[in-house]
Image (spheres, grey):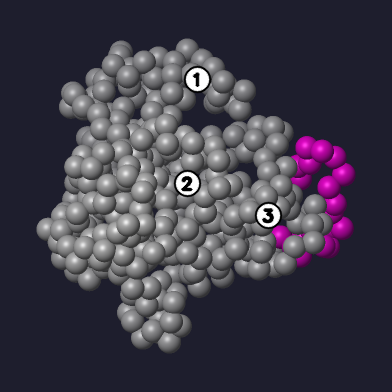
Amino acid sequence: MPYSLSLTPISLFSLRGKPVVPSSPSPKRYRFAVKSSVNKPPDASTKSGSWVSPDWLTSLSRSLTAGNDDSGIPIATAKLDDVSDLLGGALFLPLFKWMQDYGPIYRLAAGPRNFVVVSDPAIAKHVLRNYGKYSKGLVAEVSEFLFGSGFAIAEGPLWTARRRAVVPSLHKRYLSIIVDRVFCRCAERLVEKLQPDALDGTAVNMEAKFSQLTLDVIGLSVFNYNFDALNADSPVIEAVYTALKEAEARSTDLLPYWKFKFLCKLIPRQIKAEEAVSIIRKTVEDLIERCRAIVESEGERIDVEEYVNDTDPSILRFLLASREEVSSVQLRDDLLSLLVAGHETTGSVLTWTLYLLSKDSSSLAKAQEEVDRVLQGRRPAYEDIKNLKFLTRCIIESLRLYPHPP
C-alpha cells in the first residue's frame, strides 16, 4: 500500500479577546472589526460526498500491513463521526483531533492510500531541510490541472531549472522599484477604500479586501497589468478561488474520478473548475503575448546583472528580455504559479496577521509605534524592511500559527 507524508503544522494559542485600542490618538489610525470566515459553518449546498476514512478503511489498512510494518507509527482509528464535519469544511480540524488522540505522528488510511501525518516541529524541520528525499505527492497530483508544470508543484531537475530562471528577476533593484511603485501605491488605494468604513465604524471583510489588494500587486509586479480588483469585481479572483477549492476537494476525494476526462465534462463541479482554469490561463496567455510583442518590437535584451526596464519593471518583462529558450506553456505555467499561489497565499497571511493583531492590543500598539518611529510619516522603502523587526516577527508568528501552503 503506497504511503504519503503529510506535514500538518499544528499550533494553538490563547486569544485574549481584548478590543483594539491604539496607543495614542491619531487621525491616521482607524479601528476595524475584522471578520473571518474560519468559524462560519459550511453551507449545506457545499457539502458533498468527499472522502471519509471510516472503520472499514482503518481495518483494511491494519490487515494489509499486518506483519509488514515495524515503524511503530500508530494508525488513526478514523470513524465516520470524526469526519462528518469535514465534508465541506476544514481539513485541519479532524487532523488536529487525531493528533491529540495519537500524538505528533500517525498514519491515516484514506482510500487506497496511507498518509503519515506529522505535526512535530523537529520532524517537520527534517523533512523540509531534506526535501529532495520527499515528494510533493498528493499536493502536486491534485493541483496539476491548475499549475501544469509550473514551479509551484514542480520537483527535481524541473523545479531547479525553473527556479534558476525566475529568481534572478527578484534582485534588489527590482524590489526597491516595486515597493515604491506598486506596494505603496496599492496599499494607499486600499486605505482610501477603507477610510469611509473606518470613519463610520462599519465592519469590513478584510479577507476579501486583502485578496483584491494582492491580486492588484501581483498583476502590476509580475505582469505590469492593473487588474483594478480593489475598485471592480475581477473574474480572476473568483476563478482562482474556484480552482483552489477544487484542488482542496480533490485532496479529500475517496476515488480520483476527475482523472477521467469524460467525467470532467459531465460533472458540474468539474465543469466549473475547468471553466475557472480556462479563465486564469487565458488571462496569463494574453498578458504574455502582449508583453512579448513589445519586447520583440524593441529588440530588448538583458545586458546588465540587475536589469530593470524603467517603463515596465515586471518579472514577465525580465523573463522575456532574458531570451531564455522555454516553451510558451512552461512560461505560462510558471507565471500562473506566481499569480495564483502568490496572490492567494499572501492575502491569507495578511488576513491572519491583522486578525491576530486585532486580538492583542499591546502587540498592535507596539507594531504601530515601530512603524511610526521607522518611517517618520513617509512612504516605506525596501531598505526599511530590515528595521521593521517587530512587525516582521508578527508576520512570522502568524505564519507559524496559521500556515498557508502554496
Q: Which residues are magenta?
A: 291-310
- Give the residue pinned by disc 1: 388
Label 2 – label 3 distance at C-alpha: 30 Å
Name the side, left or right, on which 18 lies relative to 189: left
- Measuring from the top left, give residue 323's x and y in whole percent: 81, 57
User: Which quadrant is home to the N terminus?
Assistant: bottom left
Check residue 9 for magenta coloring. no
Label 1 – label 3 distance at C-alpha: 36 Å
Image-quadrant location for residue 349? top left
Label 2 secondary element: helix
- Measuring from the top left, give residue 108's x and y in whole percent: 29, 55
Name the side, left or right, on which 111 lies relative to 47: right
Q: Nearer the viewer, residue 182 or 338?
A: 338
- Measuring from the top left, give residue 394's x and y in whole percent: 40, 25
Name the side, left or right, on which 304 lies relative to 254: right
Give me the residue at 19% from left, 54% from top: 77
- Give the residue pinned by disc 3: 157
Count neighbours of disc 2 (C-alpha within 10 A) and say few if under 14, some if 14 to 19, many if 20 or more: many
Identify whether 350 is placed above or below 132. above
- Give the residue pinned by disc 2: 214
Q: Nearer the viewer, residue 287 or 117?
A: 117
Check residue 308 for magenta coloring. yes
Q: State which tag comes first along the sequence, 2 or 1.
A: 2
- Measuring from the top left, give residue 302's x and y in whole percent: 83, 47
Identify whether 378 is placed above or below 108. above
Q: Nearer the viewer, residue 172 or 68?
A: 68
Question: Which tag is nearer the camera, tag 2 or tag 3?
Answer: 3
- Amino acid bearing label 3: Pro
Label 3 secondary element: helix
Give me the residue at 23% from left, 42% from top: 102
Q: State which tag comes first along the sequence, 2 or 3.
A: 3
